[in-house]
Amino acid sequence: MDKLILYLQYPFVRYALIVGVLIALCSSLLGVTLVLKRFSFIGDGLSHVAFGAMAIAAVLEFSNEMMLVLPVTVVSAVLLLRTGKNTKIKGDAAIAMISVAALAFGYLIMNIFSTSSNLTGDVCSTLFGSTSILTLTLAEVWICAILSVMVVAVFVIFYNRIFAVTFDEDFAKATGTKTDAYNLMIAVVIAVIIVLAMNLVGSLLISALVIFPALSAMRLFNSFKRVTVCSAVLSVISAFAGIIISILAGTPVGSTIVAVDAAVFALCYLVGSFVSL
């Protein structure tokens, strides 16, 4: 405890905790919707797209990578949504196609136009997370906080529409709900979350932030609202605990958070076998 109190006196530790909790909260809110719509791997696909965009930004020596990564990821989310409705290219095939192509393209670009003497280290840190979460500036924390507040506000304001689109899109469309617009909104919000989460867990582990809390909550509760609230609580607790453990034990931040998420899911799975609310 004394060691933890000592670390909390440093601003970079507090910044990491704030950003980690905000990203975990945002990821969990729409994670339930994506899992129920059987579109949970969109996070994996978009994270690979973000990796490709980050590779291009690094080659072009952008001072702020988000200026390129965010627009590219948002456009890819829209394309995934549109392509997934194509009768010739189903949603899962579209995700696999775009994600693999983006991952390969990004790694190819980094090899051909390498600007670093430690290419392997750069690739590994981008894919699996790095200590960048512990080197955040105050400006980056504010950007993350503003985007997180926007994501939460969108979810709260359009909660009823998101609920309708999640459970019965055809019925919602028949009642006059503009399902295409709300699906587009969900895709854009997920793209923003993916870009924010890149510094926390890396592109290959982002899906864990989206999937694990939602599946854990579904083992305990049956209603959409309860599952969403529980998912948010479990995600925030797991992210907070993962960052603390990582700092104290010296383990990778992203992998530690995912390990905690997996342990929480195992616990909820056992509890859900006996109790369901």
Image (cartoon, helix red, strand yellow):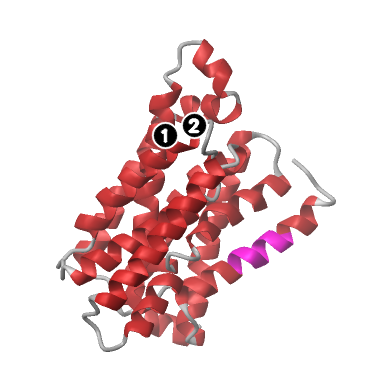
**1 in relation to 208, above or below:** below
Q: Quadrant of residue 131?
A: bottom left
Residue 263 magenta-highlighted: yes
Check disc 1 and report the residue beneath it.
82
The amino acid at mark 1 is: Arg
Q: Is residue 81 above or below residue 169?
A: below
Q: How far from the left and from the top, in percent, is residue 226?
A: 62, 39
Q: Is residue 261 magenta?
A: yes
The residue shown at (48%, 75%) is: 244
Query: Marks 2 and 1: in contact by CB < 8 Å?
Result: yes
Outermost front residue: 88
Write down the region rendered in magenta: 260-267
| Side (left or right) of 223 relative to 252 | right
Give the residue pinned by disc 2: 85
Secondary structure mostly seen in magenta is helix
Q: Which mark is residue 119?
A: none
- Most foreground residue, 80 or 272: 80
Separation (CA) of disc 1 from disc 2? 6 Å
Q: Position of residue 105 (x, y in %)?
A: 35, 64
- Along the viewing direction, whichever of 65 and 9 lies nearer the viewer: 65
Q: Name the residue: 16% across, 68% down.
A: 60
